[in-house]
Amino acid sequence: MKNIFKLSSLLLVGLLLFQISCSDDPDVEPKPIPDVTGKWRLTLATLVDGNALTPEADPLVIEKFTLDGQTFFTLEVPVGDFEITTGLVGGALAATTCQNPANYETFFIELLADGNALWFDCSVGEPGFVGQAGTWTVDTDTNGDYTILNLSVNLEGITVPVQIAIENLVVTPTQISGTAARYPMKVDFTLPIADDGNLQLLTTDIIFSTVQ
């Protein structure tokens, strides 16, 4: 009987110590959500895959490409290219807002906290579209870390917003970087992106820098 009493007493003490130790454990702090709000201009894009729908890393191919509106050729951009890719990726967004291609370099996007609104702006005062072009969210990966910036972009003529996911997100006070999966691009450069069969999707490493 004494042994049973001693055993019960030890179990009771152990239970009390366990409860006290658990109550002293610090609360698990939620993982911080990076602040991506602000004005951002594309400064670098490096092609990872010209066709995001296949498992291979393919070059990007654009038909009837032209620089002067008179000479047309098939443009093939190799994986790893950044010079041509930066102009194409930036121009694909800027063309939605800037009517004059000469103003594409002034184009920027703005991520607002109010309603998680995504705005486009040509910033030179020309009568292009300036205003809300979609929405944005910062989401978690499979590890629960906030490493995905999702942009839901309204493109002219396309009824369903195009979803651009920037994965492996890194945010600093001056830059947003990551890998943009399923970035929209034209197949035929001379036709609207909304035309049937004229939308292709690529994958590109991307860097946005703050607009002062």
Image (cartoon, helix red, strand yellow):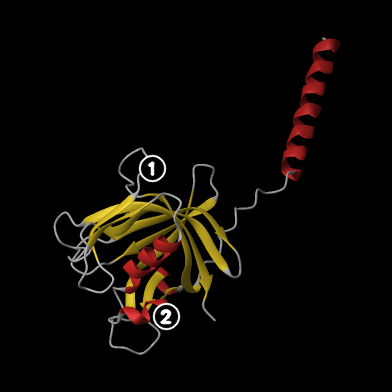
How packed mark 1 is, by other alpha carbons closer than 10 Å (few <14, some 14-19, many 20 or more), is some
Question: Under tag 1, what secondary structure?
Answer: loop
Rendered position, 88 above or below 99: above
User: In this rendering, would 55 be left or right of 212?
Assistant: left
User: In this rendering, would 57 be left or right of 187?
Assistant: right
Rendered position, 173 above or below 48: below
x then y, percent, for residue 126 = 31, 88
Question: Under tag 2, what secondary structure?
Answer: helix
- Residue furthest toward the bottom? 125
Mark 1 in CB contact with mark 2 (< 8 angstroms): no
Nearest the viewer among 13 and 41 is 41
x then y, percent, for residue 198 = 19, 57
> Which quadrant: the N terminus?
top right
**The disc labelled 1 sits on which kind of residue?**
Ala
Nearest-to-viewer mark from 1 and 2: 1
**The disc labelled 2 sits on which kind of residue?**
Thr
Rendered residue at 78%/19% (across/down): 8
> Which quadrant: the C terminus?
bottom right
Q: Earlier in the sequence, mark 1 or mark 2?
A: 1
Nearest the viewer among 140 and 12 is 140
x then y, percent, for residue 176 = 53, 63
Residue that mark 2 sits on = 106
Specify the quadrant of the image occupied by residue 143: top right
User: In this rendering, would 14 be left or right of 134?
Assistant: right
x then y, percent, for residue 15 = 75, 29
Specify the quadrant of the image occupied by residue 6: top right
Rendered residue at 35%/90% (across/down): 125
Task: Measure the alpha-carbon separation of dots 1 and 2.
Answer: 31 Å
How packed mark 2 is, by other alpha carbons closer than 10 Å (few <14, some 14-19, many 20 or more), is some
Residue that mark 1 sits on = 57
